[in-house]
Amino acid sequence: MQQLEGTIIKGIGGFYYIEVADVVYECKARGIFRKNKISPLPGDRVKFTVNDGAENTIDEIFPRRNVLVRPPIANIDRLFVVTSVCEPKPNTLVIDKLIAIAEKNDIEPVVVITKTDLGDYLELEEIYRMAGYETVVTSAETGEGAERIKELIEGHISAFAGNTGVGKSSLLNSVDKTLSLQTGEISDKLGRGRHTTRHIELFKVCGGYIADTPGFSSIDFQNAEKILKDELPFCFKEFEEYLGTCKFSTCSHTQDKGCKIIEAVNDGKIHPSRHENYITMYNEVKDLKEWEL
Ligand SMILES: Nc1nc2c(ncn2[C@@H]2O[C@H](COP(=O)(O)OP(=O)(O)O)[C@@H](O)[C@H]2O)c(=O)[nH]1
Ligand SMILES: [Mg+2]
Ligand SMILES: [Zn+2]
């Protein structure tokens, strides 16, 4: 009998798979978790007991940095929001929604611009650099940006988000040559030849974990992690320094009257694209009430 600490990389049918220094242990959760209505999740750091000749058991779940409901996962450190310069055309609303979901959950968003061999990316880069987000310019064709992505993956749990076809799988292949993920396919699965059921799994890549979750490639803002209208301004990093300075304390930052955020847009300090998308998102969530969450 031995007690260890590790990270849950997946859970299937009541069994949890916990990795410690490249060794994976199959475990059951103690009844106490069910009683307290806590389910261990992929990404959880746990203490568990390895029993000789009997089931291994999870004894303790360490406090979580965050929990997402859909996809169900804990402790994501970083969300790579992936967009291509073309094929498919960038959609800044999708990008800004993904960033907002990350911000709300204390996940660091990193904007990744792919396929830079195919077109001009300066304007897109400008929008997100200006907002204060790390923006990595990449090309799976030339290998540009791969080193930086590797550094950001190492030692963390990350997820990749972005529309199908933006080049997520190609990018991962270029940062880790051993992966050989399918590209140009509908399938977004990181694992090769695994079962068809869509459970979430963390994969070791470049000394970190990547969450393989279909929920992130086609995230639906309406049904995914909901954000209330009062929280929304805090999900735009570059708005923060102006919050609380508008003429009206109830300012929604969608109309001119004494709004410091709109003033900053007019002064060229906040990019109009970000503010336009803020208004769109605000209108989508403005009637949402706390009890609806
Ligand atoms: N020219 C070019 N094509 C790319 C690049 N990255 C991906 N592609 C192509 O874009 C298509 C979709 O890529 P894929 O990685 O499957 O996208 P995913 O759906 O986001 O995983 C494939 O045909 C890739 O070959 C790139 O950096 N440059
Ligand atoms: Mg893919
Ligand atoms: Zn305002």
Image (cartoon, rainbow, N blue to C red):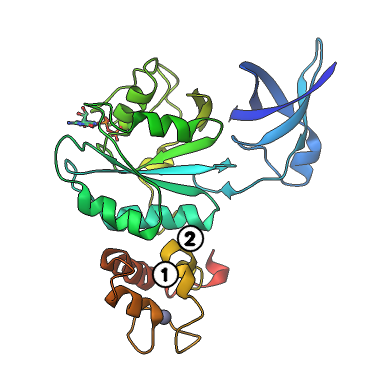
Task: For ligand 3, tell me if the residue under mark 1 lies within 8 Å.
Answer: no
Q: Is residue 236 visible?
A: no
Task: Find residue 166 and report its image quarter.
Answer: top left
Image height check: is 196 above or below 35? Answer: above
Give whichever of discs 2 and 1 has the lower sequence position: 2
Residue behind mark 2: 226
How many marks overall?
Answer: 2
Residue behind mark 1: 285
Q: Is residue 33 left or right of residue 7?
A: right
Q: Name the amino acid, label 1.
A: Val
> Residue visible at 17% across and 43% down?
86
From the viewer's side, name the closer residue of 41 and 147: 147
Task: Find residue 139 and report its image quarter.
Answer: top left
Q: For numbered disc 1, what is the local secondary structure?
A: helix
Residue contact at pointers 2 and 1, CB within 8 angstroms: yes
> Residue visible at 42% across and 42% down?
215
Give the position of the C terminus as an image quadrant: bottom right
Q: Residue furthest right?
A: 1
Residue 282 on image: x %, y % = 38, 71
Q: Is residue 23 visible?
A: yes
Query: Dot 2 surroundings within 10 Å: few (below 14), some, or many (20 or more)?
Result: some
Q: Is residue 67 left or right of residue 191?
A: right
Give the position of the N terminus as an image quadrant: top right
